[in-house]
Image (cartoon, rainbow, N blue to C red):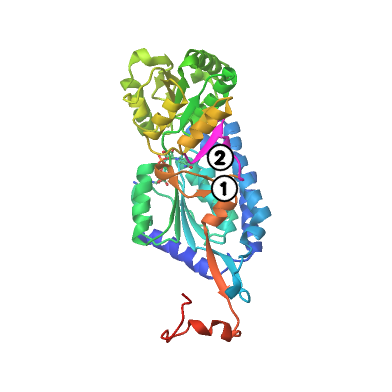
Amino acid sequence: MSGRAKEIVTRARIAFESKRTRPIEWRIQQLRRLHDMVTEQEQVLADAVYKDLRKAKFEVVVSELIVLKNEIVTAIKNVQSWAEQSYVSKNLIQKMDSMYMRKEPLGVVLIMGAWNYPVVLLLNPIVAAIASGNCAVLKPSDVSENTAAAIAKLIPQYMDKDCFPVYLGGIPETTVLLEERFDHIFYTGSTPVGKIVMTAAAKHLTPVTLELGGKSPCYVGKNVHMDIVCKRLLWGKLMNGGQTCVAPDYILCHEAVVDNLITYIKKTLKDMLGDDPKESPDLARIVNDRNFARISKVIDTMPKEKLVVGGERDIETRYIAPTVYKNVTMDDEVMASEIFGPILPIITVANEDEATKIINRQEKPLALYIFSNKPQVVENILEHTTSGGVTVNDTIMHMASHNLPFGGVGFSGTGSYHGKWGFDRLSHERAICWRKQNMEALIAARYMPYTDKNLGA
Ligand code: NAD
C-alpha cells in the first residue's frame, strides 16, 4: 500500500522538478483541459454524484460545476498578473537596490476532498494548485465512491498524468498517504479528521489549509420579511439534504417573531417540496448508513413536544424529512455537534445580544447568517462575534464569489482560498533584495570591528 503512495508522490515530485509546471502558458493549458473535462463530462459527473447522494442534476450543475468553471475561468484570466513579481517601497539605504517578491510554487500539494460536494471541493483547490505552478495529488473522499471513481478515470484523460495523479482509498490508504512528505496539504472535511491531518503534516513541518465545519448560526431578528427569510434560509439548509458545510445549522430567533417564523417555515417547506417531501425529486438523500444512523439518533433523542414538522425517515432510501424543532436549548442533543442533515433547531432569544452570547459559547463557526433590516443590529452582531464568513439577509452567498476569500477560523478552519486567495495560499512569496557591488562607502560603517563606532547618542 505504501508502495503505491510513495510511487505517485515520487512521480509528481520528479515532474515538479522537471520545471514543466513553471511556464504560465502550461498552467493555462492545464486549466483549459480541466475546463474541457467539466464541460464535456457534465453528464458523467452529474450521474456519479446522483448515485452517491441522489442529488438533482440542477443542483450539481449550479452548486458544483458552474462554481468550478467560474473558478477556472478566473484563474485563466488572472494567472499572469497573480504570478507577477511585486515591487515594494524602499528606504534611503535601499534606494539603489531592487526589492521585490517572487511568487514561487511550493512543490507537491496533497488535496483531500470531502464527499458532500465531491466534485467542486476536490477540484477547486486543484485550480489554485495549477495556477500557482504546483503538482498535486488528488485524494477524493471514499464516501462518495462513484464520483471518486469517475474523477479517477477522467483526470488522466485530460490532465498531465504525472503532475496530477488521483489516489483512491479509505482511511487505511489515506493514513499511508499522509506519511509521505508534501509541500502543502489542503484538506476539506470534518474537524476531528482535520486534527489527524495536521498531526501527520507536523511530522514534516508541512503547512496546511484546513477547510472544516461546525455549527453555523443564523439569527432572525424583528422587522424582517418572513416569507423571504424562510425561502432563503430553507434553501441554504436543504440544499444537498442539509449536508453542506456552510448550511445554517441552527436558528436564533427573536422572541417577537418566532411564531411567524414557524408559520412561514411550514408554508415554505410545502411550496418547495410539496405535501410529501419524500416524493420531491429535489431533496438529496443522506450519503451513507453511518450518517443516517447519526442523524436518526438526534431525532430519536429530541423531546417530541419540541417537534414542529418532520421526523419521518426511510432507512431503505436513507430519506430524512426536513425536521424542525422549536424551544430548543443548548442541552438538547441537536445542539451537541454539527447536524449535517435536514434538521433545523430554533432557539428563541430575547434579542441579538443574547444571540451573540450563545454564538460565542461555541467554537468559532464557518459561517454566520443574520436576517435583519436594521443595520445597527447587523453591526452589533458582527462586532461581537467572529466566523469564517458572513452573509446578511441570505445564506451561502458569501462563498459563491471568487472575489471574497473562503475559509474558516479556529475550529472551522485554517487558511482560505477561491480566486487569488487560492493562488496565494499555494505560493511562496520569496523576498528578494538585489544589490549592486558599488556604493561601498555608504555602508562601510556597518562592518566590524565595532570598537570606536559612534551610535550617535
Ligand atoms: P469525509 O469522510 O469525506 O472525509 C474527508 C477526507 O478525509 C476524505 O478524503 C477521507 O478519505 C479522509 N479521511 C476520513 N477519515 C480519515 C482518517 N481517520 N484519517 C485520514 N483521512 C481520513 O468527510 P467528512 O469529514 O465526513 O466531511 C464532513 C465535514 O466536512 C463536515 O464537518 C463539514 O462541515 C465539513 N466540510 C467543510 C467544508 C469546507 O469547505 N469548509 C466543505 C465540506 C465539508
Is 399 inside the magenta-drawn segment?
Answer: yes
Name the foreground residue: 23 vs 279.
Answer: 23
Q: In terms of image quarters, where does ligand 1 lie? A: top left
Q: Is residue 113 left or right of residue 2?
A: right
Q: Position of residue 386 (x, y in %)?
A: 46, 39
Name the foreground residue: 360 vs 197.
Answer: 360
Q: Is residue 409 left or right of residue 297?
A: right
Identified by mark 1, the residue type is His
Quadrant containing the N terminus is: bottom left
Name the foreground residue: 44 vs 296.
Answer: 296
Which residue position is annotated with label 2? 399
Residue at screen point 43% across, 57% down: 207
| Other-residue count near label 2 (Cα within 10 Å), few / some / many at <14 / 14–19 / ≥20 | some
Q: Is mark 2 within 8 Å of ligand 1?
A: yes
Secondary structure found at label 2: helix
Identified by mark 2, the residue type is Met
Instruction: Tell me the CA gap for discs 2 and 1.
Output: 9 Å
Residue 148's disc is: none
Mark 2 and mark 1 residues within 8 Å of each other at the beta carbon: yes
Q: Is residue 55 left or right of residue 293?
A: right
Q: Position of residue 304 (x, y in %)?
A: 34, 14
User: Which residue is farthest front?
Assistant: 457
Q: What are the residue bounds of the magenta stretch? A: 387-403
Residue 418's disc is: 1
Is residue 1 in view from this perspective? no
Is residue 439 in view from this perspective? yes
Name the foreground residue: 283 vs 107.
Answer: 107
Residue 6 vertical placement versus 369 (above, below): below
